[in-house]
Amino acid sequence: MSENEENKVSRRRFLKVAAGTAAAAVAVGALPRLARAEGLPHLKESDPAAQALHYYEDASKVPTTKFPQFKKGDICEVCRFYQGKPGQTWGPCQLFPGKDVNKDGWCEGFSK
């Protein structure tokens, strides 16, 4: 093979690899957007993780005698672990990976 032919093969291989890498990067970059578009499964109060942190989907139903640390207005939406977007009813929470919590919920992990 001549040097010129060797360069063509190398260039051709480089372009194929570069195109494949770019396509893979685009596909991988799109995955998180697709996953977020559909949202995560909603955390249910019966979930073992929810029970461990005494998660209530509706903070107005938190028994204050059982949880004296709960104060009116302490809801997931204002918690430092909540990652939902404004205007969304459900959003991700760092305390419950892989699940969305209700913005009006509360759990013992609440932190302003």
Image: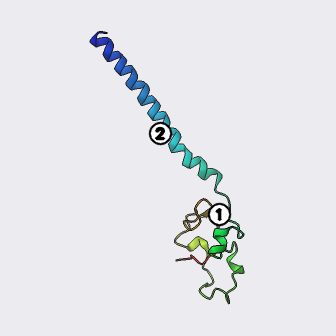
Q: Nearer the viewer, mark 1 or mark 2?
A: 2
Please name the residue shown 51% across and 42% down the image: 28
Give the CA separation, mark 1 to mark 2. 29 Å
Q: Is residue 85 above or below residue 3?
A: below
Q: Quadrant of the N terminus?
A: top left
The one of 83 and 68 positioned closer to us in this rendering: 68
* Disc on res. 90: 1
Q: Quadrant of residue 16?
A: top left
Question: Which of the two residues, 77 or 110, is positioned nearer the viewer here?
Answer: 110
Of labels 1 and 2, earlier in sequence is 2
* Residue type pointed to by label 2: Ala
Q: Is residue 22 left or right of residue 87?
A: left
**How many marks are shown on the rendered structure?**
2
Left or right for 61, reference 71: right
Q: Position of residue 87 (x, y in %)?
A: 62, 63
Instruction: Tell me which residue sits at (67%, 77%) in the image.
Output: 59
Q: Is residue 28 among what the camera can see?
A: yes
Q: Is residue 20 above or below residue 75?
A: above
Residue that sits furthest to the left in the current view: 3
- At mark 2, the secondary structure is helix
- Is 24 drawn above or below residue 66 in the view shown? above
x and y, in percent, of residue 17 in the image = 42, 28
Give the residue at x 49% y 34%: 23
Element on which disc 1 rests: strand
To which quarter of the image does residue 8 belong?
Answer: top left
Q: Position of residue 6 (x, y in %)?
A: 32, 15
Numbered badge on residue 3: none
Q: Which residue is mark 2?
A: 25
Q: Residues within 10 Å of mark 2 (few under 14, many from 20)?
A: few
